Amino acid sequence: MSEFATTLIAWQKVNGRHDLPWQNTTDPYAIWVSEIMLQQTQVAAVIGYYAKFMHRFPTIVSLAQATQEEVLQHWSGLGYYSRARNLHHAAQRIMDEHHGAFPQDFESMQALPGIGRTTAAAIASFAFHQIQTILDGNVKRVLSRHFLVEGWPSSPSVEKVLWSLAETLLPQQNMVAYTQGLMDLGATLCTRSKPKCDTCPLQASCAAFQKQRVHELPTPKPRKAIPEKHTTMLILLDGDEVMLEKRPPTGIWGGLWSFPEAENTTYPDLALTRFGVTTHAGPPLAQLSHAFTHFKLHIEPRTFYVMQRKSSVAELGQIWLNIDDAIVAAIPTPVRKILQSLQKKLASI
């Protein structure tokens, strides 16, 4: 066993995290859900969502049998909604192709929607004690610093080096402690900013620490200007009800309910003609911005009181909901913020 692995395992058993809701289990379903939620999301943000999600969908069967609407509703606010759609689809695949049992074969895991090599490795390690290595953002940072690996870790050439390095460090036993130790070290000590090198168990063998280059590594991603987009969201109010539209199944906020949007932001009221409503302007709401991975969206909410609508029955893909019900529906975070702002505004009128 490498000295790296031996030291890390010993540290994790004493100083690592042992009381997270998804730990101390070998249930592959519980581990799988947690690993998907933890993709690009901090532990503190996941804990509350995980508990509610597992309460509603305690088994693969219950998740597979649920509607996508229900799954998205319990994911609402966590972001990166393709994760929820993939989780739901994968559960249905497991029912159809694996008789409802999470597959133990490493390749079969990766064939499921939303499960890449690192996620599969975490499940294989924690649930089945298989010898597989992970390489998430935390691990890339630990390895880049400890072994002085130059270059942006997510570039194909550097990532290939890191995968190869990670494989050479694998122990033949104590895989749970080792895998958890990698995660814990990167999350609690070898952090992106203000790393706690003084208490790191790997300090003596860390090349970046010895050469005083910890803050230089890992090499940052080459900076590009973040595109900015603008949209106008139309908030149609009919009494205490608001209209929402179902977004396309893929893409940004895929499958969620949202406000209709106006392509012509100069004359947004022209977009109202397709709804067959007669309106007049409602209370003004503050603009807001929402950052995605690849762009920033600036939203101008425009409210309209509906004086007359063609039918009390919504068109396909549209729904009229009480504002209180809309706030807890499967909606994106910015839409929830707009609804909450509108709720306060109407209460003060």
Image (cartoon, rainbow, N blue to C red):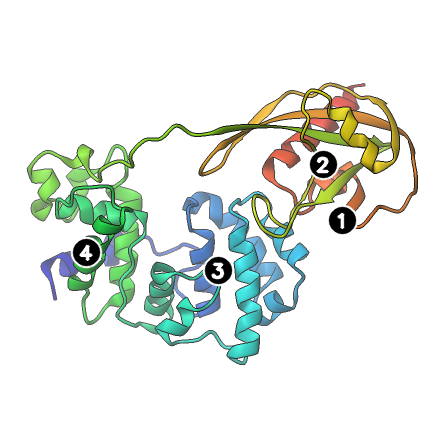
Return the residue at label 2: 260
Within 10 angstroms of label 2, few (less than 14), some, or many (20 or more) residues? many
24 sits left or right of 205 in the view:
right
As helix, strand or loop, the secondary structure at mark 4 comes to: helix
Using the numbered discs, state the Cα–Cα distance from disc 1 to disc 4 in whole angstroms.
Answer: 52 Å
Using the numbered discs, state the Cα–Cα distance from disc 3 to disc 2 in whole angstroms.
Answer: 32 Å
Q: Vertical placement of 123 versus 344: above or below?
A: below
Q: Which of marks 1 and 4 is nearer the N terminus?
A: 4
Q: Give x and y (percent) for residue 272.
A: 80, 31
Return the residue at label 4: 8
Return the residue at label 1: 317
- The kind of residue tagged 3 is Val
Q: Pick out the residue farthest to the bottom.
A: 99
As helix, strand or loop, the secondary structure at mark 2 comes to: loop
- The kind of residue tagged 4 is Leu
Q: Which of marks 3 and 2 is nearer the N terminus?
A: 3
Return the residue at label 3: 33
Nearer the observer, disc 3 or disc 4?
Answer: 3
CB under 8 Å between discs 4 and 2 = no
Using the numbered discs, state the Cα–Cα distance from disc 3 to disc 1 in whole angstroms.
Answer: 29 Å
Nearer the observer, disc 3 or disc 1?
Answer: 1
Q: Earlier in the sequence, mark 3 or mark 1?
A: 3
277 sits left or right of 5 in the view:
right
Nearer the observer, disc 3 or disc 2?
Answer: 2
Q: Vertical placement of 335 versus 133: above or below?
A: above
- The kind of residue tagged 1 is Gly
